[in-house]
Image (tube, grey):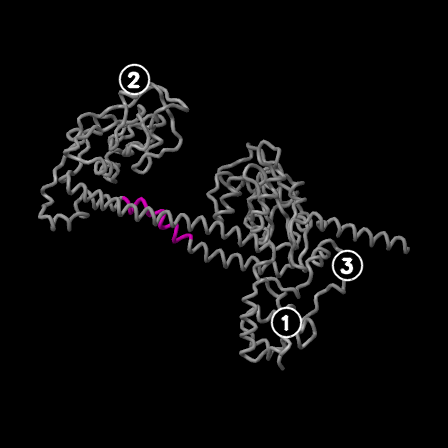
Amino acid sequence: MAKENKKAALSMEERLDAALVPDWEQPYKVPANWCWTYIRAGFNVSSSKRVHKNDWRSDGVPFYRTRELVKLSERGFVDNELFITSELYEQFKKNYGVPSSGDLLISGVGTIGVPYVIDDERPFYFKDGNIIWFKNRGVFFPQYIYYLYKSTFMFNQLHVMSAGTTVDTYTIINAENTMLPLPPYAEQQRIVDRIESLFAKLDEAKEKAQAVVDGYDARRAAILHKAFTGELTAEWRTKNDVSLESWNQYSIAEICHSLKYGTAKKSKDSGSVVVIRMGNLQSGEIDWSDLAFTDDKEDIAKYKLAPGDVLFNRTNSAALVGKTSIYRGDYPAIYAGYLIKLDYDHDVVIGDYLNFALNTHEAKQYYNSVKSDGVNQSNINAKKIGAFVIPVPSIKEQERIVELVKRLLEKEQKAKDAAEQVIEQIDTMKKSILARAFRGELGTNDPTDENAVELLKETLNIEKTPTKRAKAITIPKELSTNLKTELEKRIVKLFYQKDTKELTIKDIMTVSSKTFDVLDCLRSLEQRQLITKLENGNYRLMG
């Protein structure tokens, strides 16, 4: 009998050992009442039963693949395309079970590791092989796992597991053996609350920054509209006694000597002269990345560009055809056949003014109305661009318009760049928050919480260790009502947990990794005469 009991005890010990990550394999240290475990310790990991294509329907019970799962994870909803019949769903539910509230789905092929928490009992089913089902056994707070799978730590772990496969793959076996830090259950909830609180503030800032980025094109169009309706230089005209009626209306053909198509010859990866192609025309300027070259002397002589030349993109996608840029002479260059060089009369119009005029919202509306659409691209020939009419003031007023437009656009570009930098910083901050969260560094951990190992024992049906059970602590009501924050409660609770009226500063610092927050709490508690600081530097609980 004694031998049987010993064998049973050893079996329980082995089960616990199998659920815990050995010290030498643990990726980093966690708080004393946390532990390192595996996904298999808290979830039954599986997938769905095979649903054949001939079982797909256009309505019924939603059927999710990886693409739908990604959208659900990001947005919380999806406009579903595929369904199965309710009869087939009920058959799966009866024979094999289906995910329920508190379970998670994780993408397993392609875009791996994308988490989705099931938070209601609405029926759905999912594609086998592509998606892994984590059936929750109560060890993990589901949102804790959701954010963990969003962390860089988990991303790196999954992609190491996936190394060597042609397509990124996260298998059921890999999922079961995925390591993760396990805090006490209450701490998991506090971590999620803190993450969501911090993320909400960052999302608000990101939304404002994104509005600046999204509004850039509209603000740019408004500046150009004011420039070419005369509003931008109204004050200049008043000062210089110039009337808006002095502006002329000229077609592009009237102000250009010729509209020349570029070279049709193939370019090379290297050479002495750059061949500017349609991809190099960006936001009114030449983008000098992704260049092609030529050494063809005939082409160089025929198509060589001069600073101030304006290039029009005659063939591109419907959205991009008609984009225009000015060449400023950064590098010797010719231009490709999908571009047209506008040889304009420099006594009538200046290059920057013409370039801006051809990039206005009104110009783009014109291009859209005259373009010829092919299978994959649209075209605007020289005759059609030549018919476009622009307002043309005096050269002096053009110079003033260009000066003001450049100044305003530069200001808008700086605002956009700054907003994009903020968005990038916010994304970096979120990664940092998640990294700290799963190390116990967000100031939420309560060292008096029962050790997470006990939570594992419950799940594994192993008898808990009484000596390791956290002491039940109750703060007297008359004292509790005077405590303002959760951190103050933790500090006071520590006096009762240690069963002492006096604590060292080192003891007190164990309640949070945020040193300054703890010190602020201590000062506040002193001021309200709930604790007092002794001559030896220790703190005593009053009353």
Compared to residue 195, the image places residue 62 above or below, namely above
Name the spot of residue 77 as percent of width and height, x first.
48, 47
Question: At x 86% / y 54%, what residue is drawn?
Answer: 6
Mark identifier at residue 298: 2
Judge from the rendering whether residue 301 lies leftward or rightward of residue 486; answer left or right. left
Compared to residue 260, the image places residue 187 above or below, namely below
Report if the CB atoms under discs 1 and 2 are less than 8 Å apart. Answer: no
Can the viewer see residue 204 in this picture? yes
Badge nearest the viewer, 3 or 1: 1
Judge from the rendering whether residue 371 lies leftward or rightward of residue 114; answer left or right. left
Question: Foreground: 464 or 83?
Answer: 464
Given the image, on which type of amino acid does mark 1 rest? Answer: Lys
Name the spot of residue 238 as percent of width and height, x first.
11, 50
What segment is highlighted magenta in the picture?
206-220
Q: Distance from label 2 to label 3 (Cα)?
A: 89 Å
Per the image, the residue denoted by label 1 is: 493
Per the image, the residue denoted by label 3 is: 463
Name the spot of residue 461 as percent of width and height, x first.
75, 55
* Dominant SS type (magenta): helix
Give whichever of discs 3 and 1 has the lower sequence position: 3
Asked which secondary structure carries label 3, the reply is loop
Can the viewer see residue 324 in this picture? no
Give whichever of discs 2 and 3 has the lower sequence position: 2
- Few, some or many C-alpha atoms within 10 Å of disc 3 (few <14, some 14-19, many ≥20)? few
